[in-house]
Image (cartoon, rainbow, N blue to C red):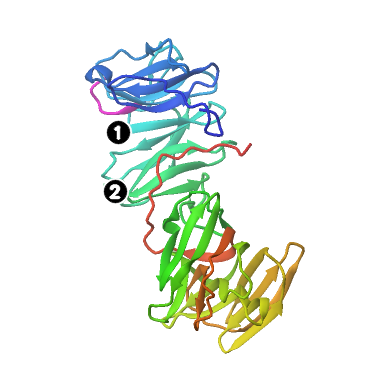
Amino acid sequence: MNADGSNVVQVTNDHAYDDHPHFTGYDKALVYESNRGGNWEIRRIAIDGSGETNLTRNRAADRYPATAARGAIAFTSDRGGSGQHVWSMRWNGTHPKQLTRRPGGQSQPAWDPAGTRIAYVVGSPGQGTSVWSMQRNGTKPTRLAFAAGRDELSPAWSPDGSSIVYQDCAAGVPSSCDLLTVAPGSTPANVSVLHAPYLDTFDGGDIRFWQVITNGTGATNTEQNGQLVTTLAADSAQGGQFDEIETHWGTQCRLVGDFDVQADYRLLAWPAENGVQAALSSFAGPSNIGFMALRESQVWGEQYGSWIPQDFVSVATAATAGTLRLQREGDTAVTSYSNGSSWIGLSSGPTATDPATITLGAGSFMNRFVHQEVKVAWDNFRINAATISCGTPWWEDDSPDWHAVP
């Protein structure tokens, strides 16, 4: 397919397991592994599905092909009876050459961009593996990544050839993996852990970052057209622990220490004096001590508001779109808003320093809702700065590749 996901073409069409495709880089073809016929072979095929060729034609299991810029192919094979090793061959399958010979198995080769070095995995997956590199002729083996009790798998080179990314799993637990990067001689960095800056544009990504909380009836939060739309239906009714109409999305992950977050809002359906607050909020500690920046409509007017415990500040506005912002600096909360030109401070005051959950949503209480439909669209939720703690992640990362951003 194209880089933008368009023009998807099925290249192979058989009853075999076809896996690990790689572009050859010098023509419009792919190499891949296939167990067609009951044996793993390395095959080559044009990107339109024509001209398929079996490159290995060997009784051994030949797997994990990787292509070099110069046309060579590295692969894993158990031919020779001495276990899995890394081999290389020419683009057409000729001149196969064994590159590794040490006991314990070597597999999953990956060429660097220049075609001069190969990263590969040493050991048996499930029993602890490490990542090494060697010259294209098999000389100068160098260990790049190792951790006791871990399977280090699926290496790929950075575009400049200075670092690798690889899959790091508890040995024998392939469903619990992170992606790490490392340069020779440096400490690995975990890129699976969420880091600031973090952006959610509500365009159908992994909604498991959020949890949904609703009180009363008739209030909903849904992703629509690249936005998170909060709706209070005309027949919404107060209820729940706090006797309110309210719905919000709250982060599953918590922000530790200082943080800076913001979100854009747009009022889609906003009757006058509707009694609703649309809020970006923070809740921390066992008592959920919170502070918030909000846009509301009440009988006394349209306004931006800030709630920091025991202190409510408001500013009159006619804005139907803008950005709300929350900051925590030590034990001080700071609230502000923007209508597109600059940040305007609302208030500051003391707040809890515990790990915080951030929420987006809208609600009404004290029987202020006028029972006309209200809709607020949220977009571009940003964690500008924070330490993001997600506990046990709900995602799995594997099979990395590394490309330069166009």
Q: Position of residue 157 (x, y in %)?
A: 51, 37
226 above or below 263?
Answer: above
Residue 366 showing in the rendered view: yes
List the residue tagged with mark 1: 105
User: In the figure, 157 relative to 240: above or below?
Assistant: above
What residue is shown with label 2?
A: 171
The disc at residue 113 is: none
Instruction: Answer left or right for 34 relative to 89.
Output: left
Give SS at disc 1: loop
Q: Position of residue 375 (x, y in %)?
A: 55, 63
Q: Circle 2: is it few (<14), some (14-19), or many (20+) Cα within 10 Å?
A: many
Q: Position of residue 220 (x, y in %)?
A: 45, 63
Earlier sequence position, callout 1 versus callout 2: 1
Mark 1 surroundings within 10 Å by alpha-carbon count, few (fewer than 14), some (14 through 19), many (20 or more):
many
Q: Which residues are magenta?
A: 80-86
Q: Residue 361 colored magenta?
A: no
Residue drawn at x 45%, y 28% as measured from the top left: 139
Q: Amino acid at mark 2?
A: Ala
